[in-house]
């Protein structure tokens, strides 16, 4: 079993390496398949031994082998994060359609979070891929019900759209589309849990960022990463949290 865990983690880091390319290229409107991986500074094409997830970054001490330019710490972070999330999903859900769909969703959330933090946008292209793949998973698992997810799609997008309308555009269009997409993957209950956690984490995070003077009150604070963290926590603990909440309000 241990060897299987190691393999799932390594597989996750390789996917993470691909996600890095997506994070870099999609906001720059570059193709994600061509040209092959190259240094963003000297354009030198990277060899397979430059592209080993996490390991290459450590061996090269975070610098390009060819021009010595610093490589963003984002690369090993995304690889490690993807590996860990894949491993956790595998431990929780085994080899199943569910873990496959959650792994796909988590990959999209990683891409969206890092793009939102750097560029302050959530690309429509990524959302569109999510909607298509999410709908495909619903067709594959149609025997287990589809309404739960359609309601999730409507609740996720609807609640944020309502907040946006009431607050006069306080919520970004990308966040609304992201929540709708998540609903299609996790169903309405976990969508509610995701919304709740995102708001709580966003409030804590926003205050912390301003207190530590990383951001000012006027700065845009991306909400995508909070939605993403809330969603991953919900996938793992959402039902426990909802049960706890119901117990609390019933006294
Ligand atoms: Zn270089």
Image: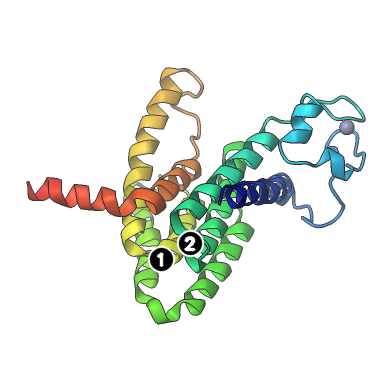
On residue 181, the disc is 2
* Figure check: 79 above or below 155: above
Give coordinates of residue 140: x percent, y percent: 51, 78
Q: Nearer the viewer, residue 176 or 136?
A: 136
Q: Residue furthest bottom?
A: 143
Give coordinates of residue 168: x percent, y percent: 37, 48
Real-space CA distance between mark 2 and mark 1, rounded to the nearest whole angstrom: 6 Å
Say whether mark 2 is within 8 Å of ligand 1: no
Say whether mark 1 is within 8 Å of ligand 1: no
- Judge from the rendering whether residue 136 lies leftward or rightward of residue 25; answer left or right: left
* Figure check: 139 above or below 227: below
Q: Residues within 10 Å of mark 1 (few under 14, many from 20)?
A: many
Q: Secondary structure at mark 2?
A: helix
- Judge from the rendering whether residue 112 lies leftward or rightward of residue 160; answer left or right: right
Going from N to C along the chain, the mark reached first, 2 or 1, is 1
Give coordinates of residue 155: x percent, y percent: 34, 62
Q: Residues within 10 Å of mark 2 (few under 14, many from 20)?
A: many
On residue 246, the disc is none
* Figure check: 142 above or below 197: below
**Callout 2–callout 1 Cβ contact below 8 Å:** yes
Quarter holding ligand 1: top right
Within the image, what quadrant is residue 206 found in? Answer: top left
Please tell me which residue is depicted at 48% across the width and 52% down the height of the picture.
91
Within the image, what quadrant is residue 144 found in? Answer: bottom left
- Judge from the rendering whether residue 40 lies leftward or rightward of residue 197; answer left or right: right
Give the number of callouts.
Answer: 2
Q: Secondary structure at mark 1?
A: helix
Residue position marked by numbered label 1 in the rendering = 153
Give coordinates of residue 190: x percent, y percent: 35, 57
């Amino acid at each position: 079993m241990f060897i299987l865990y190691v393999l799932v983690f390594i597989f996750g880091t390789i996917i993470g390496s691909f996600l890095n390319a997506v994070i870099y290229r999609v906001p720059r409107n570059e193709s994600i398949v061509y040209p092959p991986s190259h240094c963003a500074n000297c354009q030198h094409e990277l060899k397979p031994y430059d592209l080993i997830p996490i390991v290459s970054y450590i061996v090269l001490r975070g610098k390009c082998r060819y021009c010595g330019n610093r490589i963003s710490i984002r690369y090993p972070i995304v690889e490690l994060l993807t590996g860990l999330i894949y491993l956790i999903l595998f431990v929780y859900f085994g080899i199943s359609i569910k873990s496959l769909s959650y792994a796909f969703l988590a990959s999209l959330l990683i891409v969206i979070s890092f793009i939102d933090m750097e560029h302050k946008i959530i690309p429509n292209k990524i959302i569109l891929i999510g909607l298509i793949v999410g709908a495909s998973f619903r067709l594959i698992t149609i025997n287990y019900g589809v309404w739960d997810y359609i309601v999730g799609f409507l609740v996720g997008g609807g609640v944020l759209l309502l907040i946006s309308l009431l607050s006069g555009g306080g919520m970004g269009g990308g966040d609304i589309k992201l929540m709708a997409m998540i609903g299609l993957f996790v169903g309405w209950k976990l969508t509610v849990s995701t919304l709740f956690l995102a708001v709580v984490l966003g409030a804590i995070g926003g205050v912390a960022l301003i207190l530590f003077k990383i951001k000012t009150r006027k700065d845009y604070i991306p909400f995508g990463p909070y939605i993403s963290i809330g969603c991953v926590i919900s996938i793992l603990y959402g039902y426990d949290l909802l049960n706890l909440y119901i117990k609390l309000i019933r006294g």
